[in-house]
Amino acid sequence: MRQSLLFLLLTLFTAGALAEAPPYNRVSLSEQASTELENDRMVAILFAQAEGHDTVAPAREVNRTVRQAVNKARQRPGIEVSTLNYRTQPVYEKGRIVRWRVTQQVRLESHEGQALGKLIGELQSDSLRVQSLGYRLSEEKRRQHIDEVIEQALQRFTHRAQRIAATLGRKGYRLVRLSVNEGRPGPTPVRLDAMVADTPLARRAGPVTIESRPAPRA
């Protein structure tokens, strides 16, 4: 996945060129570099849901289920837990409200895939259901490698710029503009039935490619 985007604009010059070269001496180049990193964070969204003839009873049931899930997750080292969307909505039949449905989500995230998988199984036994499951690259790991990828892209850019300047009979070039726009890879979804307790998290997750693409902007 694209991780960093570099915009570069250079000016070719000769030995007697003025400090501010005219626009027709400017050349735009683009270059890229990438590397693959293993996802190291597992993310799961679960939800509790209940229905009733009014909103009171299902709300009480959902609140109790979510509270128990959050308390259980907080007792597990290395697992982050938070609550998400809380919704109350009517259920219609033949144009009439026949009951009410209350839903709330619980988000779990951890480096420890096996521990999180075990907790998910326990929470499913406690009436929660899995809405989504995926993997992502942590910010810490991304930052460890992004500078290396940017350096690779700049080295390739420099090599190409020197060759172009030489081919055009110029003594060298001057970098005019440089900006960095860092993209971020999204979560990698997986099949829920693909979870295997003894499979390492990173292998289940698969690799993520981080990419640096120097591209000029006029």
Image (spheres, helix red, strand yellow):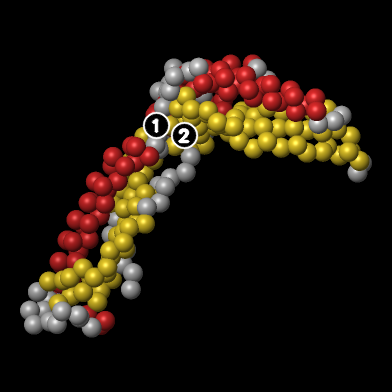
Q: Residue at x 80, y 28 (%)?
A: 56
Q: Quadrant of the C terminus?
A: bottom left
The answer to which of 179 and 186 lies nearer the viewer is 179
Q: Report x, y in % for residue 212.
A: 31, 53
| Residue of label 1 | 40
The answer to which of 174 and 210 lies nearer the viewer is 174
Residue 72, picture quadrant: top right
Q: Residue at x 34, y 41 (%)?
A: 142
Q: Residue at x 58, y 23 (%)?
A: 70
The kind of secondary structure element at disc 2 is strand
Q: Residue at x 26, y 47 (%)?
A: 147
Q: Amino acid at mark 2?
A: Tyr
The answer to which of 166 and 183 lies nearer the viewer is 183
The answer to which of 16 and 167 lies nearer the viewer is 16
Q: Amino acid at mark 1?
A: Asp
Q: Report x, y in % for residue 60.
A: 75, 24
Task: Give the label on residue 135, or none.
Answer: 2
The kind of secondary structure element at disc 1 is loop
Q: Report x, y in % for residue 21.
A: 20, 80
How many numbered marks does the figure carry? 2
**Vertical position of residue 34 compared to residue 127: above or below:** below
Task: Give the label on residue 132, or none.
Answer: none
Q: Is residue 196 visible?
A: no
Farthest left residue in view? 15
